[in-house]
Image: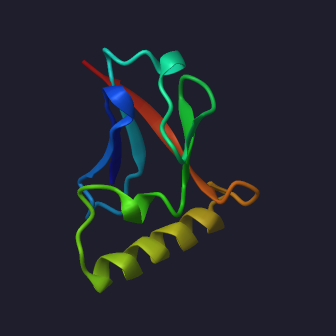
Amino acid sequence: MIIECLDGGVVRLTEPDDFRRFKLVLHADIRTEAQSWNGITLLDDRDALVSIDLVPTLAGRPDDADWDQRYQEMVAKAREHGWIDAERQAIRAHIERIP
């Protein structure tokens, strides 16, 4: 699952059925210091926190109950591995920059 951040604060979900990967993709032309994406906190150049509640609201999310169940299972597994920030209710995501 990829959270793709575009210029102008646009955020969308790509590869929504890949529950084995979770990453944040930033396009190379985005100046992160000038951007604000609601529900996403950049921790440093490599990691970000993505609100658990944000992901199901993003464009690109399949509209079916099976997806919801699988997403909740992914969150539960992320919690087991220590990838959930309990205070912020957010999932840790690796940041990837693409040209």
What colouring does the structure picture have?
A: rainbow
Q: Quadrant of the N terminus?
A: bottom left
Total count of labels: 0
- In the image, what residue occupies the spot 37% across and 53% down? 21
- Up-down relation of residue 97 to residue 42 (above or below): above
Q: Classify residue 2 as left or right of residue 22.
A: left
Q: Is residue 18 above or below residue 8?
A: below
Tell me where residue 56 appears, x and y as whole percent: 39, 65
In terms of depth relative to the viewer, which is nearer, 67 or 46? 67
* Residue 6 found in image quarter: top left
Q: Which image quarter: residue 41?
A: top right
Residue lying farthest to the front in this orientation: 8
For the residue pair 15 and 51, the one nearer the viewer reads as: 51
Q: Residue at (28%, 60%) from the top-left corner?
A: 18
* Residue farthest to the right, as pictured: 87
Q: Position of residue 88 (x, y in %)?
A: 70, 54
Q: Is residue 19 above or below residue 11?
A: below
Dividing the picture into quadrants, the one containing residue 28 is top left
User: On the rendered image, what quadrant is the C terminus found in?
Assistant: top left
* Closer to us: 58 or 8: 8
